[in-house]
Image (tube, coloured by chain):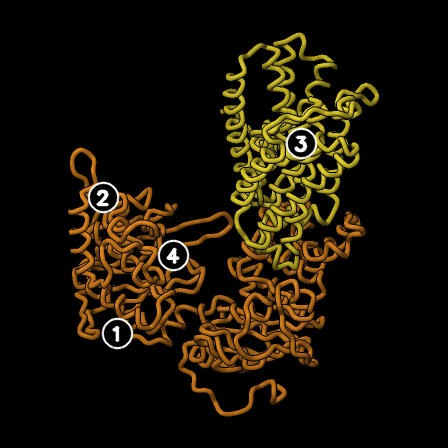
C-alpha cells in the first residue's frame, strides 16, 4: 500500500478530506465539461447548504460526545411552521420555526443531561416522535408558501452568489470561531475527550451539552426554513434520512464518533465532498441508485484510510 | 531454587515433581515502559503458587502473557516439557491454561449452563443444541463445585460470588492444568470466601496447578505452598510459605529501590488547612481523623484497598460521608461536587492520570488551562495571549518538557503528563493539594523530579496530602506518615524517625496502637 502517512506529511496541515475534495474536483473536471463552471459550483453550494447547516451543529454535538438523530424531523416541523404560519406574517412564522428547533433541541439536551440516557436513544425517540407531530400538524398535507417574498428569498443572490450559500458560509465562519476561540468551544472538546476529567476539573458538563443540543436544534430549524424557501413549500416527509447524511458528512470531515476531536473546516470539507460526488456523478449520468452504492463505499474507504493515518501518527514523543 | 518439601497444614508438596509450567526469562515492553524484565516463574501440579507485588509490579501482565492475551517479546513458556506459544486466549485454554479475571466475563442474559458451555455447546444432528446433555454436563460440574444454584438460573440474577463460581465452572470444561486467579476475593464478602477457598483446594487436590494473585497476606498464607514476589517488573524471589512470615514477604514486595532523600523537606508549618474528624463512609473506611497544615506534606501509606483513595474522593466531593466532618481552615464544610471542591480550594491529582486527569486529545496548553478558562476569557472569548502566558509560567516552573504547547498530551511521557495535571490544578490557586499515587507508572528519574516538585510546592505554602503505596516515596517526601489498614488509621509517625518495620507492621494490621498523643497534637 502507498504510505498514507507520507502523503499527508507532504501536504502538511491539510485535512485528508480536503485532499479528497481536490482529487474528486480534478477527476470530475476531466469527466464532464459542465462540471468546472461557476454556475455549477453555485449549484453545489446551494444544494449542500441544507445538510451543511445541520452539520455545523452536529459537529458540536458529536465533538461533545453525543449525537442527534432528530434533526431531520425537526427540519420538517420547522419548515411546516415557517410555511403554514405565514398568514400571521413572515416574522411570526420564522420566529415560531426557529423557536421550535431550539426548544426541541433543549428538550433533547435536558433529557440526556438529567437522566444520563444515551443521546442515541433519546434522539432516536425524538426523531420518531417529532416526525409524528409533523404528520399530526400537517394532516399529511403539503403547505405552499403564501408570501412570495419567502420563495423569492430562496433564489435571490448577493453579489451574484446565492443568498443561501452566503448564509451557509457565514455560519461556517461563526461556528468555526466559536469552536476555536471561546471557552464553550474548548470545553466542548474537553467534555467529549474525557468527561470524567472535565467534570473533575470543575467544568459544568451538563450545561455545555444542553447548549450544543440547542445549537443543533437551531441549525436544523434554519435548514428547514432555507429548504422550504427553495421549494416554496413544505412537505411532511421533508428531511427524511437527513440525519444520516449529516452524520456522514461530519464523520467524513474527521470528527470522531466517540467525541473529543473534530473541526468545522473538516465538516465543510465533508459536506462539499458529498455534494461534489453527487453533482459530478449526476453530470456523468450515473444512475441514482449506483450513486448511493458508490457514496456508501467511499464513506467506508475514507474512514479506513483515516484510521490508518491516525494509528501511525500516534507514537510517543520522548523529549 | 526448589527448596525441600515442607509440610504446610498437611498439604505437602513433593519437590521432586517437575513443574507443569515454566515461564523463562519473560520480557514485555509497552511504549515507554518495560513492564516485565526477564521474569521467570514456575507452577507444579497440585500446588497453589501465590504471585505477589505492588500495583504495576507486573503480575497481571505476566499472567496475560501466559494466557495468550499479550505476547512476550523475549522468553519462553514451557508446558509439560514442551515449548508453547499462544496467539490468543482460546489457544491457551485449549492447552489447559485458564485465567479467571478480576472483572468477570459472563453473559448475564444467558443461563448458567449456556454460560459454562459458551462457544462449545453440545450439539446433536443436524445442528441443534443438545439441551439434555448440556444440563446433565452442567449438573456434573456444579455438583463437583458444590454449587447451590442450578443450570437453568439466569447468570444476571446471581450474586458476584456465584458468578465467580460460574466462571470457575467454565474453566473446568477444558480439564485445566493451570488455573490463574487474579484477585479473586476483591469483591467477595467474608462468608463467601471460604466457598472459593474450598474450590481452590479441591482443584489442587485434583492435580491442577493454581496461580493465586492477591494483596491479602492472610489469604496467601492460608492457601499457598510457595510465594513469588515481583517488583517493578522484575523477579524478586520465591519463598516457601511454611518457612516465611508476613514481614519478610512484605519487605520483599516493597523493598527499597530508591535511596531515601530526606533532604530539602519543608520545615515551617502554620495553621490547619484541612482537618478531618471521625470521617466514615459505610463499608469503606471508618473513624478517620487527621490534619494537614500550611507548608506541610502528610503521607498516607497503606496497601491497595486500605481505603486511601476513597478518603481523598470523599474530601473532593465524589463520595458522601456517612459520619464525621471535614474542616477547611477551621470551618466545617460539606463538599457537594468536584466543582464545589475546586471553588473551595481543593485540588485532587487522581490516581489514574489518563482516565481522570487529562483530556488526551487536547494539547498541553489546553489541558493546563482546563480549570481556569473563565479567568482567561472575556464574554466567553478566550485570550490566546493570556492562555499562553499561563501555560508558559507553569511550563517553566514545573519544568515540563514538551516540543511546544501544541503537543497533544497523549504523546508525552508519564512524568510530563503528571506535571501537566499538577500544573492544571495550580492554576486554580488551591490551598490543599491531594496527590494520589503521584509517581505511578513513571520512570525513576522523573520520580525524583516529581518528589522535588512536591517539596517545593509545600515550601511555597500549599498544604499537601500524598497518598502512596511506595515506602521510599512516603518516607522521602512527607513530614508525617499516616498508616492505614483495611479502612482504618492504625498509626501516625514522624517520617524522619520511623523505622521500616514499624511501618510494615502498621499497614499489615499487626501494629498495636501505642498509647500517647498523636504527633500533630504534640507539636512535632
Q: Chain A is drawn in which colour?
A: yellow
**Relative to residue B517, is residue B149 depicted above or below?**
above
**In front: label 2 or label 3:** 3
Mark 4 falls within which chain? B
- Where does residue B303 sit, x and y in percent of width and height? 45, 70
Are circles 4 and 3 on residues that touch, CB within 8 Å? no
**In front: label 1 or label 4:** 4
Q: Mark 3 points at which residue?
A: A80
**In front: label 2 or label 1:** 2
Q: How far apart are marks 2 and 3 (CA)?
A: 56 Å
Q: Which label's residue is closer to the chain start, 2 or 1?
A: 2
The residue at the far bottom in this view is B515
**In front: label 1 or label 3:** 3
Mark 2 falls within which chain? B
Callouts 2 and 1 on one subunit? yes
Badge 2: how crowded within 10 Å, few (<14), some, or many (20+)? some
- Under circle 3, the secondary element is helix
**Relative to residue B350, is residue B82 depicted above or below?**
above
Question: At 71% from the left edge and 60% from the top edge, which residue is drawn?
Answer: B427
- Under circle 4, the secondary element is loop
- Where does residue B452 sit, x and y in percent of width and height? 63, 66
- Where does residue B134 sit, x and y in percent of width and height? 19, 48
Callouts 2 and 4 on one subunit? yes
**Relative to residue B147, is residue B110 depicted above or below?**
above
Residue B103: mark: 4
Give the side of residue A193 with respect to residue B56, left or right: right
- Under circle 1, the secondary element is helix
Q: Mark 1 points at which residue?
A: B242
**In front: label 4 or label 3:** 3
Amino acid at each position: 500500500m502507498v504510505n498514507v502517512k507520507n502523503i499527508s506529511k507532504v501536504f502538511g496541515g491539510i485535512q485528508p478530506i480536503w485532499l479528497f475534495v481536490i482529487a474528486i474536483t480534478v477527476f470530475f473536471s476531466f469527466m464532464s465539461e459542465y462540471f468546472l463552471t461557476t454556475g455549477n459550483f453555485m449549484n453545489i453550494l446551494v444544494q449542500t447548504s441544507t445538510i451543511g447547516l445541520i452539520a455545523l451543529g452536529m459537529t458540536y454535538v458529536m465533538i461533545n460526545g453525543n449525537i442527534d438523530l432528530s434533526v431531520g424531523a425537526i427540519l420538517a416541523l420547522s419548515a411546516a411552521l415557517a410555511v403554514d404560519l405565514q398568514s400571521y406574517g413572515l416574522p411570526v412564522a420564522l420566529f415560531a420555526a426557529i423557536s421550535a428547533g431550539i426548544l426541541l433541541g433543549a428538550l433533547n439536551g435536558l433529557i440526556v443531561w438529567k437522566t444520563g440516557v444515551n443521546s442515541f436513544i433519546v434522539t432516536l425517540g425524538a426523531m420518531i416522535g417529532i416526525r409524528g407531530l409533523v404528520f399530526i400538524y400537517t394532516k399529511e398535507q403539503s403547505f405552499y408558501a403564501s408570501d412570495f417574498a419567502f420563495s423569492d428569498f430562496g433564489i435571490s443572490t448577493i453579489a451574484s452568489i446565492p443568498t443561501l450559500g452566503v448564509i451557509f458560509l457565514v455560519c461556517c465562519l461563526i461556528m468555526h470561531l466559536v469552536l476555536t476561540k471561546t471557552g464553550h468551544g474548548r470545553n466542548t472538546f474537553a467534555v467529549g475527550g474525557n468527561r470524567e476529567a472535565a467534570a473533575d476539573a470543575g467544568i459544568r458538563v451538563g450545561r455545555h451539552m444542553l447548549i450544543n443540543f440547542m445549537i443543533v436544534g437551531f441549525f436544523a430549524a434554519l435548514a428547514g426554513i432555507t429548504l422550504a424557501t427553495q421549494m416554496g413549500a413544505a412537505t411532511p416527509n421533508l428531511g427524511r434520512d437527513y440525519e444520516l447524511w449529516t452524520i456522514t458528512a461530519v464523520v467524513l470531515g474527521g470528527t470522531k464518533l466517540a467525541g473529543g476531536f473534530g473541526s468545522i473546516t473538516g465538516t465543510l470539507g465533508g459536506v462539499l465532498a458529498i455534494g461534489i460526488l453527487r453533482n459530478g456523478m449526476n453530470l456523468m449520468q450515473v444512475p441514482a441508485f449506483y450513486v448511493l452504492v458508490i457514496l456508501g463505499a467511499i464513506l467506508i474507504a475514507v474512514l479506513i484510510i483515516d484510521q490508518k493515518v491516525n494509528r501511525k501518527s500516534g507514537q510517543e514523543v520522548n523529549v | 531454587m526448589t527448596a525441600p518439601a515442607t509440610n504446610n497444614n498437611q498439604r505437602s508438596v513433593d519437590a521432586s515433581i517437575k513443574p507443569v509450567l515454566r515461564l523463562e526469562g519473560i520480557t514485555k515492553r509497552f511504549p515507554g515502559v518495560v513492564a516485565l524484565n526477564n521474569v521467570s516463574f514456575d507452577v507444579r501440579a497440585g500446588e497453589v503458587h501465590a504471585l505477589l507485588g505492588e500495583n504495576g509490579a507486573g503480575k497481571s501482565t505476566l499472567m496475560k502473557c501466559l494466557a495468550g492475551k499479550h505476547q512476550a517479546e523475549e522468553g519462553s513458556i514451557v508446558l509439560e516439557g514442551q515449548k508453547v506459544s499462544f496467539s490468543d486466549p482460546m489457544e491457551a485454554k485449549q492447552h489447559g491454561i485458564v485465567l479467571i479475571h478480576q472483572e468477570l466475563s459472563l453473559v448475564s442474559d444467558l443461563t448458567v449452563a449456556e454460560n459454562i458451555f459458551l462457544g462449545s455447546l453440545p450439539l446433536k444432528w443436524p445442528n441443534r443444541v443438545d439441551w439434555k446433555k448440556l444440563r446433565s454436563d452442567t449438573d456434573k460440574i456444579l455438583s463437583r463445585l458444590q454449587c447451590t444454584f442450578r443450570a437453568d438460573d439466569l447468570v444476571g440474577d446471581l450474586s458476584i460470588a456465584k458468578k465467580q463460581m460460574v466462571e470457575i465452572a467454565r474453566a473446568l470444561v477444558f480439564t485445566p492444568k493451570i488455573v490463574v486467579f487474579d484477585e479473586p476475593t476483591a469483591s467477595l464478602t467474608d462468608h463467601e470466601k471460604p466457598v472459593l477457598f474450598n474450590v481452590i483446594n479441591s482443584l489442587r487436590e485434583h492435580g491442577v496447578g493454581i496461580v493465586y494473585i492477591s494483596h491479602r497476606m492472610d489469604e496467601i498464607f492460608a492457601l499457598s505452598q510457595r510465594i513469588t514476589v515481583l517488583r517493578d517488573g522484575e523477579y524478586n524471589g520465591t519463598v516457601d510459605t511454611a518457612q516465611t512470615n508476613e514481614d519478610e514477604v512484605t519487605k520483599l514486595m516493597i523493598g527499597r529501590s530508591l535511596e531515601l532523600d530526606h533532604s530539602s523537606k519543608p520545615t515551617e508549618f502554620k495553621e490547619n488547612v484541612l482537618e478531618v474528624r471521625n470521617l466514615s463512609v459505610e463499608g469503606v473506611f471508618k473513624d478517620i481523623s487527621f490534619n494537614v497544615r500550611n507548608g506541610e506534606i502528610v503521607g498516607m501509606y497503606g496497601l491497595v484497598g486500605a481505603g486511601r483513595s476513597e478518603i481523598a474522593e470523599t474530601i473532593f466531593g465524589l463520595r458522601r460521608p456517612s459520619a464525621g466532618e471535614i474542616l477547611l481552615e477551621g470551618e466545617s464544610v460539606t463538599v457537594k461536587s468536584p466543582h464545589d471542591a475546586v471553588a473551595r480550594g481543593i485540588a485532587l491529582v487522581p490516581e489514574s492520570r489518563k482516565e481522570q486527569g487529562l483530556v488526551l486529545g487536547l494539547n498541553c496548553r489546553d489541558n493546563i488551562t482546563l480549570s481556569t478558562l473563565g479567568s482567561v476569557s472575556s464574554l466567553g472569548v478566550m485570550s490566546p495571549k493570556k492562555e499562553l502566558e499561563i501555560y508558559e509560567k507553569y511550563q517553566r516552573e514545573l519544568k515540563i518538557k514538551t516540543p511546544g504547547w501544541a503537543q497533544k498530551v497523549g504523546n508525552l511521557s508519564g512524568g510530563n503528563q503528571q506535571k501537566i495535571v499538577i500544573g492544571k490544578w495550580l492554576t486554580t490557586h488551591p490551598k490543599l493539594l491531594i496527590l494520589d499515587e503521584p509517581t505511578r507508572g513513571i520512570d525513576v528519574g522523573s520520580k525524583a523530579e516529581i518528589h522535588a516538585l512536591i517539596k517545593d510546592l509545600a515550601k511555597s505554602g500549599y498544604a499537601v496530602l500524598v497518598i502512596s503505596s511506595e515506602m521510599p516515596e512516603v518516607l522521602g517526601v512527607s513530614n508525617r506518615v499516616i498508616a492505614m489498614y483495611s479502612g482504618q488509621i492504625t498509626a501516625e509517625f514522624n517520617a524522619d524517625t520511623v523505622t521500616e518495620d514499624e511501618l510494615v507492621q502498621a499497614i499489615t494490621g499487626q501494629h498495636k496502637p501505642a498509647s500517647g498523643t498523636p504527633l500533630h497534637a504534640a507539636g512535632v
